[in-house]
Amino acid sequence: MTETEIALNEYCKKDIAHCTYEELYTALLHIVEAESQKRLYAVKGRKLYYISAEFLIGKLLSNNLINLGLYDDVKACLEAHGKSMARLEEVEPEPSLGNGGLGRLAACFLDSIATLNLPGDGIGLRYHCGLFRQNFTENFQNETPDFWLGSHDWAEKTAKTYPVSLAGKPYTARLYRIAVTGYEGRTNYLNLFDLDTVEQSVIRDGIRFDKTDIGKNLTLFLYPDDSDDAGRLLRIYQQYLMVSAGAQLILEECLERGSNLHNLHEYAAIQINDTHPSMVIPELIRLLCEKDIAFEEAVEIVTKTCAYTNHTILAEALEKWPKHYLEQVVPQLVPIIEELDTLARSQGSDSSTAIIDSDNVVHMAHMDIHFTHSTNGVAALHTEILKNSELNHFYRLYPEKFNNKTNGITFRRWLLKCNPELAAFIESLIGPDFKKDASRLERLADFAEDEAVLKQLSAIKRNNKSALAKWLEHTQNITVNPDSLFAIQSKRLHEYKRQQLNLLYLVHQYFEIKAGHLPPAPLTAVFGAKAAPAYIIAKDIIHALLVLSKVIAADAEVSGWLQIAFIENYNVTAAEKMIPACDLSEQISLASKEASGTGNMKFMLNGALTLGTMDGANVEIAEAVGNDNIYIFGQSSSQVIRRYGNGSYIAREWYEIDPNIRRAVDFLTSEKMLACGSAEHLGRLQNELIHKDWFQTLPDFNAYVVRKNQALADYAGNPLDWAKRTLLNISKAGFFSSDRTIAEYNSDIWHLG
Ligand code: 26Q
């Protein structure tokens, strides 16, 4: 008997074959936790605290088993007793404690930090419901609560509590901890705070809830709807609970390890993930002052300890709060923020870089840049845009603070876990080193002319496409053709990401096929995307895609050549099925708008070619693989920035001049679409495209059609060459490992251990 089998028998007290999957899951959860405890090591020197309102960790069982080196053993043991690992995985609810890229990045970072044996914990919130569950009814998105907490989840309730004052009243934050074990690495923690008094009973229909009593609702939901004042205030309450309890935990740990607080920065490095945790700056200053440290020194200590990451160029996503909101929720911080504003102004800050503006609005990002020692962007282009335009005034004040850290993804989840067949094949070619040193993937290039290798690579892709097709059939009742080209666009629904451009292409192809211009290969356009519940146009785009999918499916002339599969409730678990099955990765944001993107990296690593604009990390992917191995199209970021600058873009002109654009846009309100679509929603989207099109879809339309059709022709025309180009993409993916990103954060910003 293997050790795993002995442990399982001991825990379950009966034969494995007779256990339910729930029993096996609970047993393995305990076995994993016990193993993780063995990898807890004392911290010497600096420890990292990664504070983030989101950690989109996904299911943990298989990932933890892989990282502990137990996965193969457990799988074999289960199979020997007639149990399946896949079925076991279904038992675990996914913790969807994040919205998208920023939250998933935080999860990848925790994996890499522990894998690199660095001491570093996450600090966040224990939401009772993660991101809403999406379901489609009558071609519309509906939202319901995502209750992920069960009787056995990964978060251990601790006895540690911290007092937090909200709106002048005392509350008690309780610490929950999830062990994070790296691949052959150490164990760190994800610290999540909650209130004991939160009550699910205040949830009304759908995801609406009673917002009056924060004691009952504070951590109920990830990011409550911020479209009304009550929602916005609740967001500040959440953020302050996180940073106040987090700051107390940090100070307590540093004191325990011998810090006198004057030297806090020798014990702690704090990374602020976007502006959501920015109140940690004034909160730490407040706590240090309470411990008799002078204000000026407290500011200096905090500045040396904290660093800030910016994840967005969209002005509307940069958090700014009316001062009276803060006066209501965190009156204890307001005098400190005012002092910081005065200090910033005395250091040469002008009205464009002030923390509190003339309308009494507090700019959280401004406070971050003044009072941390590092501000980083998340891809080379993004950082350049921050320095040269968006944050140029700050860059001129503090050029030394600005630096780039191109995002990355953990190869454990996004290759070993989600694509075991590809991982094993790679290992058979170049050995196992790539799992911990991703740059070794470069060696795959030696096989670029090896026909047997290329054929095997295509066969693996085909298997993954069949597996996705089966899963779609089984879970969503969607039938797709695995011999078609799978082009996948999966990410949050946002106008700047331009799912609407993909929509217009699909309408265009529909007309072309109807006119007898058959494409070189059948295409399956796969979408996965949730729209924020209050984001009206985003929801209209979902509606249009769902309606179009029905129109196409009902048309026998077209449906053999073109299909739309919109996957319901896209989340990490769905991504793990979709990404290995992708041929063409759609990364079509308007150049200059996507800070980095990380889906682009996941698809590349799994052997998809990218169809994309020169935006975010696409730029670095293009540099790595060369123009022959990627499909780039569209305006450059400087063209886009110029067009915005001189206000020269008028959508209507493009619509009127170009018959293909007009035909596609007009079709949105055609009789065929209205037969199962809503005139209100489709009309509003059409109107938006003709009269506004803020994200310049129409100017990129023709280039997109040409490049995408080129990809279809290449895919159908020369499969071996396609496979060679996917191999070269995989071989260049090493740079996009979050192990590389974290090593850079550590050597440039954190200096841990
Ligand atoms: C702000 C104010 C009020 C309510 C919500 C928010 C809010 C919530 C979530 C603002 C931003 C977010 C999430 C942003 C995000 O995911 N950004 C993405 O970060 C990735 C990791 O760096 C990048 O790859 C993506 O390009 C970027 O869009």
Image (cartoon, grey):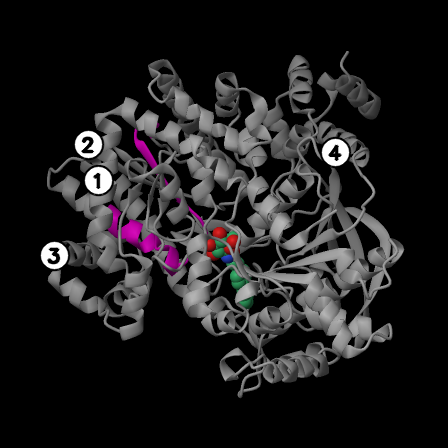
**Mark 4 residue element:** helix
Residue 688 belongs to magenta span = no
Q: Earlier in the sequence, mark 3 or mark 4?
A: 4
- CA separation, marks 2 and 3? 23 Å
Q: Identify which residue, 489 or 471, lies in the foreground.
A: 489
Up-down: is 1 above or below 24?
above
- CA separation, marks 1 and 2? 8 Å
* Dots 2, 3 in contact, CB < 8 A: no
- CA separation, marks 3 and 4? 59 Å
Residue pictured at 85% horizontal, 59% vertical: 259
**Mark 1 residue element:** helix
Q: Percent x, y for residue 358?
A: 53, 88
- CA separation, marks 1 and 3? 18 Å
- CA separation, marks 4 and 2? 49 Å
In the picture, measured across the screen, residue 47 lies left or right of residue 58, that is: right
In the rendered structure, which amino acid carries the disc numbered 4? Leu
Using the image, tell me which numbered label, if any, was put on residue 659: 3
Can residue 196 be seen at all in this image of the molecule? Answer: no
Residue 494 belongs to magenta span = yes
Q: Which residue is mark 2?
A: 520
How many callouts does the rendering have? 4
Up-down: is 610 above or below 129?
above
Q: Earlier in the sequence, mark 1 or mark 2?
A: 2
In the picture, measured across the screen, residue 21 lies left or right of residue 382, that is: right
Q: Which residue is mark 1?
A: 709
Q: Earlier in the sequence, mark 4 or mark 1?
A: 4
Q: Residues within 10 Å of mark 4 (few under 14, many from 20)?
A: some
Residue pictured at 88% horizontal, 55% vertical: 256
Q: Quadrant of the N terminus?
A: top right
* Dots 1, 2 in contact, CB < 8 A: yes
**Mark 3 residue element:** helix
